[in-house]
Image (cartoon, coloured by chain):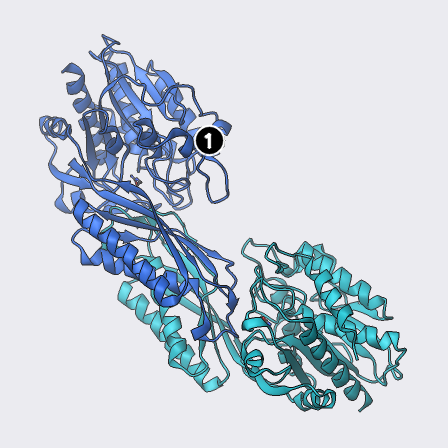
Chain colours: A blue, B cyan
Amino acid sequence: RVNGQRLWDSLMEMGEIGGTEKGGCNRLAATDLDKQARDLFCDWCKATGCDIAIDKFGNIFAKRPGLNNDLPAVATGSHLDTQPTGGKFDGVFGVLSGVEVLRTLHENNITTPTPIEVSVWTNEEGSRFQPAMQGSGVYVGRFDLQKELDKTDVNGLRLGDELARIGYLGEEELGSRNIGAFFEAHIEQGPILEDEEKAIGVVRLGQGIRWYNVEVQGRESHSGTTPMHLRKDAMVAAGKIVTEIEALANRYENGLGTVGFMQVYPNSRNTIPGNIKFSADLRNPNPEVLATMHEEFVAFCEGVAKDRDLDISVDNFWYFAPVEFNASDDVKAATEKLGYSHMDIYAGAGHDACYMADLVPSGMIFTPCENGISHNEIEYSSPEQCEAGANVLLHTMLTASHR
Amino acid sequence: RVNGQRLWDSLMEMGEIGGTEKGGCNRLAATDLDKQARDLFCDWCKATGCDIAIDKFGNIFAKRPGLNNDLPAVATGSHLDTQPTGGKFDGVFGVLSGVEVLRTLHENNITTPTPIEVSVWTNEEGSRFQPAMQGSGVYVGRFDLQKELDKTDVNGLRLGDELARIGYLGEEELGSRNIGAFFEAHIEQGPILEDEEKAIGVVRLGQGIRWYNVEVQGRESHSGTTPMHLRKDAMVAAGKIVTEIEALANRYENGLGTVGFMQVYPNSRNTIPGNIKFSADLRNPNPEVLATMHEEFVAFCEGVAKDRDLDISVDNFWYFAPVEFNASDDVKAATEKLGYSHMDIYAGAGHDACYMADLVPSGMIFTPCENGISHNEIEYSSPEQCEAGANVLLHTMLTASHR
Ligand SMILES: NC(=O)NCCC(=O)O
Ligand SMILES: NC(=O)NCCC(=O)O
């Protein structure tokens, strides 16, 4: 069994890096704070006898040798970057559960049949740079390395430069780790486990995601002198689309739709906005439904552009197809062995394990979080809930290593 | 008669300070560029024999002595600050028409019965700091000097500090100029004079304006895991209000409604926005209609807050009541004397003359602008249109000085 108190203490210590007044965490990818978090992770792993490797996209791999180091490692991992108003658990819980597995093995002098590996993936959140799960996506070959290194944040800073600046642009080739299976522990980020009073969610599916960059090009003019019928108001066009996204999501079972990001130009209160850039995020566990949502969304935007005689471009730059986790039975078996209550569940968020499932048998372990709130500074999981998840991770990995 | 070519050359020279690629101007109030524009204005006025005074809010007064310097001056003026995507004419045309009046008197060795004064008012645009017509509003006592000096821009910079930094926080008391009448030349900023093929608009009224700061407080949460019915999405609430403002304005004759400014927090595409701040700008020439629009707007926001179980605060921090110009007959007489085509018109935008009308008989001279477009880099008036306006200003001021 893992040491729940130690896991909790590490979560709290890591949470201080970028810690906010409201008890959350603001630690965007490839910032100085991300560097501090990565350094701490590396120190902790080295103390359990791990070797550290860093790949050309800044993904970190801490490997603890096993009996036969030619065998593929059993791996776990998640991310240390957070949302701007993020919590202490999203991603970090998965990484530190991995560290807790390493420490448990280390203090019990256990040498596993295969190596055990814990990874930290670059920019899982997709907040500072897009898309999300970028590090694991590049690792498995879904995205082009150079193209992703060239991505810039809202201030025009390049991800590759930022990784080099914080000392985490490594030499290891992408996709080159010798890994046999991948498991990721994560807080659920939704309300279901808590509602159903289950300790563990056995994740069967990651739902489909479509991300868009929408740009409305209207015409700047004076708010006090431009008659309503002569306007090309980018703000009202954007407002129509924002409200439609909610209506669209509500029309479909399990549909979700969100506009989280918006930039208004020139953003002056007596100038009718001439240009607005915003994001759209559509999700559904059913790929056909998501495709229909996509079509309706694009058609709606086209309609607004036509009705209002302005230009709207809709760039669906990321489609993440729903993924099935083919190693979830291993998670379920470990959960039952340990006697935790559990249920099958699907992941609403994207996770690094979703991309790792391209390469190796993968599974995910969900733990409840308070009121289902995540991407919020008040995000919370109890020490007991975290401990249960880490125990399931430990035993899932041990079983896989002995197989 | 004024020298139209000289006026045009000065407009083009001034337009280079903050000039944009698209031929417009980005010269926000109390910036380094504003300082350069003010310095150039002072140099030009000194060359015509003016004394320069600067008051405690950074308003500049250039006074050309007359026969009797105890008599109140006949004054003109406007502003040199622009929108972020502004043009070369809005405000600047009025200031430089004043300079052209000074130059015309100077080169013809005319000594007017009363002094002639040209003013530059601080932050007329209301873009960087709010409200608009801030310098003239403080001058006439509508706003409190200290409170306005303490206003901050989106980056938290204080207006008083910025004025001091650029060397334009003067010693002169507010409201202390000896002025007998005030006339302002300005481009119309709307389409009416062009449509009606008139050279001059005799401005009878400035319409009513209400400015609001609206803040929606929802709750941040995950875009992929938060079911639609559990959201407190500040973005959708803001979108509902944005689209209603258009509908509201369309319900009333001459109604205008605009959201020009919006700030989204935390502005991350997979976090449902928890907080959105935005502006609203409602206008109507009829104060009763504007009052009704105000009530409907506030009620709508309250309804959205109630329906969606989130907090919305609506701060109507500026009400500018419609103002009648009681010296417009002087403008009309000068226009007719010069033989320009003209019509009565009302001002859609606020202007410094609207506040000066509190203190002294005031009038405004409008000139056409291309397609009625203003607060846009492509804003344009022809040399002939500008010349006509400056001629009317010259003769209006001469008549008033001889009275
Ligand atoms: N786990 C998590 O919050 N991932 C961010 C990617 C997403 O938007 O789903
Ligand atoms: N003239 C002008 O554009 N003034 C700005 C104030 C307003 O919004 O009307």
Would you name the residue on which mark 1 appears?
Answer: A160
Residue A44: quadrant of the picture: top left
- Residue B372 visible in rendering: yes
Q: Is residue B56 above or below residue B338?
A: above
Q: Which amino acid is tagged 1?
A: Gly
Q: Quadrant of the N terminus of chain B?
A: bottom right
Front residue of this view, candidates A51 and B282: B282
Where residue B289 sits: x, y (%)? 44, 84
- Residue B175 visible in rendering: no
Where residue B376 sits: x, y (%)? 56, 64
- Helix, strand or loop at label 1? It is helix
Where residue A164 sits: x, y (%)? 49, 27
Identify the residue at horizontal 71%, vertical 63% (top origin).
Answer: B12
Where residue B167 sits: x, y (%)? 74, 57
Q: Quadrant of ligand 2?
A: bottom right
User: How many circles with numbers are drawn on the protein?
Assistant: 1
**Are there few (<14), some (14-19), or many (20+) residues within 10 Å of tag 1?**
many
Front residue of this view, candidates B340 and A227: B340
Report whether B128 appears left or right of A232. right
Q: Quadrant of the C terminus of chain B?
A: bottom right
What is the chain identity of the residue bearing mark 1? A
Identify the residue at horizontal 37%, vertical 39% (top origin).
Answer: A82
Q: Is residue B398 above or below residue B30?
A: below
Q: Is residue B170 above or below residue B97?
A: above
Report whether B164 appears left or right of B240. right
Front residue of this view, candidates A249 and B54: A249
Residue B275: quadrant of the picture: bottom left
Identify the residue at horizontal 73%, vertical 87% (top origin).
Answer: B338
Report whether B309 appears left or right of A332. right
